[in-house]
Amino acid sequence: MRSNLRRSGILGTGSSLPEKVMTNYDLEKIVDTSHDWIVSRTGIHSRRIADENIATSDLSTEAAKQALERANIKAEQLDLIIVATVTPDMLFPSTACLVQSNLGAKNAAAFDLEAACSGFLYSVAIADQFIRTGVYNYVLVIGAETLSKIMNWKDRNTCILFGDGAGAVVLGPTEEERGIMSTYLGADGNGGKFLSMPGGGSRNPASIQSIEQDLHYIHMEGNEVFKFAVRIMAEAAEKALDLCGLGVDDINYLVPHQANTRIITSAAKRLKLHMDKVYVNLDVYGNMSAASVPVALDEALMNGKIKKGDNVVLVAFGGGLTWGSCVIKW
Ligand code: UT7
């Protein structure tokens, strides 16, 4: 059970998506695939692709500015910036430090967090700890990716799935009985090999050989990730509910990681949750890894799907393998 500390909540959200749309028909021209296959196996129709000169910090900064404005918080009031990403601008300095500079958030500490598609939920859990214990008041959490930059456009197993984008939230203390009710995180490093980018780190530093072996691209065993995802999405959602004394019947809205419609519908079925209560936008954006949950949350709020007083569950799974979930009373 949670100790009786003050509560944190989301004060504002924002998102940023590149303008360029890549459809399945565009992909048909570059790999051996078809619109019908992609739609029937994944639910994806299109995805956004960042221009060559746009990096993760650019999308992050735009999303952050929107979230700050909606939260009515100035950049100087931020105590901490966390950027969840597997596609940082560079290995260091962190993308969070680049964003801190872009925003002029001179009083904020800043770091990147890498938990693949679960990164946003890992970051929210950290922000929640800092705020609840009173160490910090305002934390900016961003999930942002430019996955197109690490995509092997010759690999039809991966390149049809992913897209670029950023979502941001500003968290702060809440006075009412609302906000983050529970967070739950998990990992299984034994499954790390199923989803990875092997090149560019200390194991396989960049070299002519690493490039020739395609090590700087996403590698994935889709079937393995699929099986894991279907199980863990439902389990993680149930665990977060359990931690705050709620059950599936109390869910007003579920915002899941947007990887595959079949994964989302199977998870909803396991939870016995009607799809009317589940937000899906992967048809237009594909899988944006750490950005997918915050962008979906931002859209669900802007579309009026989430209302004050709702119990909202966020849940994600990803490389690592990792997973995370949280319950928020809106
Ligand atoms: O954020 C986490 C990231 N990752 C995921 O969430 C991935 C989870 N996994 C999945 O979503 C699915 O496993 C995929 C969408 C990646 C693949 O769907 P699948 O139903 O598991 O297909 P499969 O890999 O079993 O392939 C079925 C067939 C194969 O052909 P054969 O061997 O039956 O002749 C593949 O070669 O489909 C073929 N195939 C394709 N055909 C057209 C695989 N990719 C494609 C493609 N276009 N893009």
Image: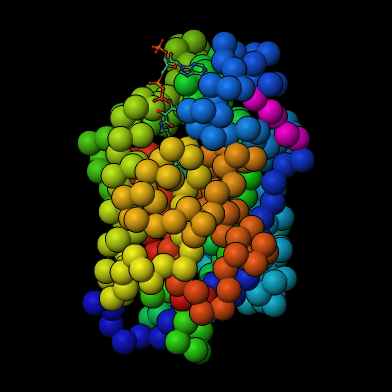
At 60% from the left and 53% from the top, the residue drawn is 295
At 34% from the left and 27% from the top, the residue drawn is 223
Q: Is residue 67 above or below residue 309?
A: above
Can residue 90 be seen here? The reply is no
At 59% from the left and 17% from the top, the residue drawn is 34
In this figure, what is the number of numbered marks?
0
Specify the color scheme: rainbow
Can residue 286 be seen here? The reply is yes
Q: Is residue 316 above or below residue 251?
A: above
Query: Viewed as shown, does residue 314 lie left or right of 104?
Result: left
Residue 173 image offset from top left, x and y in percent: 50, 82
Principal secondary structure, stretch drawn in magenta: strand
Residue 203 image offset from top left, x and y in percent: 35, 27
Residue 262 belongs to magenta span: no
Q: Is residue 308 above or below residue 255?
A: below
Query: Viewed as shown, does residue 256 lie left or right of 191?
Result: right
Q: Which residues are magenta?
A: 20-24
Q: Nearer the viewer, residue 31 or 138?
A: 31
At 30% from the left and 39% from the top, the residue drawn is 228
Q: Nearer the viewer, residue 294 or 281?
A: 281
Residue 123 sits in quarter: bottom left
Residue 212 image offset from top left, x and y in percent: 49, 10
Pick the quarter of the image with the N terminus. bottom left
- Residue located farthest toward the right when viewing the structure as drawn: 19
Residue 68 image offset from top left, x and y in percent: 67, 69
Query: Viewed as shown, does residue 291 lie left or right of 201?
Result: right
Quarter of the rendered image showing ligand 1: top left
